[in-house]
Image (cartoon, grey):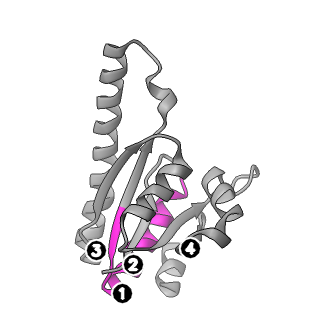
């Protein structure tokens, strides 16, 4: 089964990337793999404090994931997988793509802010020609109706 890999973060554009991935997966009998990455600099404290912060970050990720997973199950009939990694975003995304041969498309949301499409879109699009899978970039301000029409 082909999986759509989508990155879960706190960005506004993440919502449209999630919607797109779930809608495409539902229409193509695929799956959704949700990846959340905890940056390494979040835990540069004493060991005990770092461990508590790491656990709190994982709890936040699970709570955030459950919101999207419930919508995917209820509305799209998709039961997504969650993968949590620690490290720098781009290397972790590439590692997941390499480790899971079922991942067939990377779905990213593009920011509508003046600063550009966002760091992941900027970094990964520079290397798009060497990636083993295609990238789908979903505009952050695309309406639900338009997303439904294009999926």
Q: Where residue 90 sits in the image (x, y, percent)?
A: 56, 51
Mark 1 burial class by Cα count in 10 Å: few <14, some 14-19, many 20+: few
As measured in the structure, the alpha-carbon distance from the residue carrying label 3 to the one carrying label 4 is 21 Å
As measured in the structure, the alpha-carbon distance from the residue carrying label 2 to the one carrying label 4 is 13 Å
Q: Residue furthest top?
A: 46
User: Residue 71, located in which quarter of the rendered image?
Assistant: bottom left
Mark 2 or 3: the one toward you: 2
Residue 11 in view, yes or no: no
N-terminal label among 2 and 3: 2
Could you tell me which secondary element the residue under label 2 belongs to? helix
Mark carried by residue 27: 1
Pointer 2: what residue?
23
Q: Identify the residue at image location x=57%, y=72%.
A: 135
Mark 3 burial class by Cα count in 10 Å: few <14, some 14-19, many 20+: few
User: Residue 1, located in which quarter of the rendered image?
Assistant: bottom left
Foreground of the two, 53 or 147: 53
Q: Where residue 33 sits in the image (x, y, percent)?
A: 35, 64
Pointer 3: what residue?
75
Mark carried by residue 136: 4
As measured in the structure, the alpha-carbon distance from the residue carrying label 4 to the one carrying label 1 is 16 Å
Mark 4 or 1: the one toward you: 4
Q: Which residues are magenta?
A: 12-33
N-terminal label among 4 and 1: 1
Residue 91 in view, yes or no: yes
N-terminal label among 3 and 1: 1
Q: Where residue 29 sits in the image (x, y, percent)?
A: 30, 85
Mark 2 burial class by Cα count in 10 Å: few <14, some 14-19, many 20+: many
Foreground of the two, 15 or 38: 38
Q: Identify the residue at image location x=35%, y=74%.
A: 102
> Relative to residue 13, is residue 107 depicted above or below?
below
N-terminal label among 3 and 4: 3
N-terminal label among 2 and 4: 2
């Amino acid at each position: 089964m082909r999986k759509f890999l989508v990155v879960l973060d706190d960005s506004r554009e993440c919502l449209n990337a999630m919607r797109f991935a779930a809608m495409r997966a539902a229409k193509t009998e695929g799956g959704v793999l949700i990846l959340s990455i905890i940056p390494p600099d979040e835990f540069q404290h004493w060991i005990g404090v770092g461990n508590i912060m790491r656990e709190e970050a994982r709890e936040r990720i699970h709570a955030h994931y459950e919101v999207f997973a419930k919508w995917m199950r209820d509305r799209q009939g998709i039961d997504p997988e969650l993968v949590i990694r620690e490290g720098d975003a781009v290397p972790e995304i590439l590692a997941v793509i390499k480790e899971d041969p079922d991942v067939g498309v990377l779905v990213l949301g593009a920011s509508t802010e003046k600063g550009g499409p966002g760091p992941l879109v900027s970094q990964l699009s520079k290397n798009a020609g060497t990636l083993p899978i295609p990238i789908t970039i979903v505009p952050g301000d695309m309406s639900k109706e338009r997303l439904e029409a294009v999926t």
